[in-house]
Image (cartoon, rainbow, N blue to C red):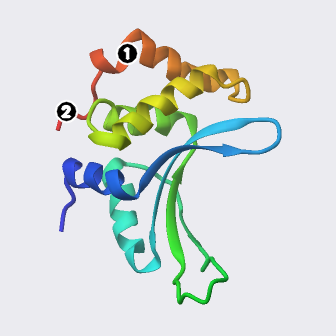
Amino acid sequence: MKLTNDYIRGLVEGRGSFTFSTNNTRKVPAFVIVMHERDKMLLEKVRDHLGLKNKIYVYGPYGNDGANRGKNTRLIVREFGPMKNVIIPFFYKRLVGNKRKQFEEWLEKIGSDPLVPESYKLYYKLYKSGYWDKNLKFLN
């Protein structure tokens, strides 16, 4: 079954996150989708639909509360080019509710957080300049 852009955006509304990969000295903007290990093939389809080359990671299980949790799979995108040319334009002004708010706050934080390397602040500058308004890559 072929995935649609709207299906992927809906999946991200529930299972995706716009976040940062961090260490003590810097924060790198990241996009992550986390699902149960049984959905690894679905994450591979999402990755392929978006034209990404990222590996799908398998982690876990997590928690020490006695619950029988399975492993989880993650699609993690941190690389500069795919973030600028695929992830941000794909979701820009196309999310609804809290995920839209999270996405916009994430872009703002990229511009204001001193731990974000200067090179990644280009995302914020493009956002503020209206670049993605003029250059929407994914119209559906």
Return the x and y of residue 84 as percentages of the image width and height: 47, 30
Distance, label 1 to label 2, CA atoms, is 15 Å
Quadrant the C terminus occupies: top left
Q: Residue at x 54, y 79 (%)?
A: 71
Q: Is residue 66 left or right of residue 35?
A: right
Give the label on residue 58, or none: none
CB within 8 Å, label 1 to label 2: no
Q: Which of marks 1 and 2 is nearer the N terminus?
A: 1
Picture coordinates of residue 40, whole percent (x, y): 42, 73
Relative to 20, does residue 3 appear above or below in the rendering?
below
Name which residue type carries label 1. Tyr
Q: How many marks?
A: 2
Quadrant of residue 29 within the rendered picture: top right
- Tell me which residue sits at (39%, 34%) in the image: 101
Residue nearest the viewer, comparing 119 with 95: 95
Which amino acid does the dot numbered 2 rest on?
A: Leu
Q: From what the image shows, is residue 138 above or below residue 118?
A: below
Mark 1 surroundings: few (<14), some (14-19) or many (≥20) residues within 10 A: few
Say few, some or many: other residues with alpha carbon within 10 Å of mark 2 (under 14 / 14 to 19 / 20 or more).
Answer: few
In the rendered image, the quadrant that contains the N terminus is: bottom left
Work out which residue is located at the far right of the displayed protein and give it: 24
The quadrant where residue 25 appears: top right
Instruction: Using residue 10 as the reference point, say whether residue 83 is left or right of it.
Output: right
Image side of residue 66 versus residue 77, left or right? right
From this view, report whether residue 119 is shown above or below residue 10: above
Q: Which residue, given by chain and number where applicable, does mark 2 sit on?
A: 139
Please name whichever residue, 45 or 33, is drawn nearer the observer in this view of the structure. Answer: 33
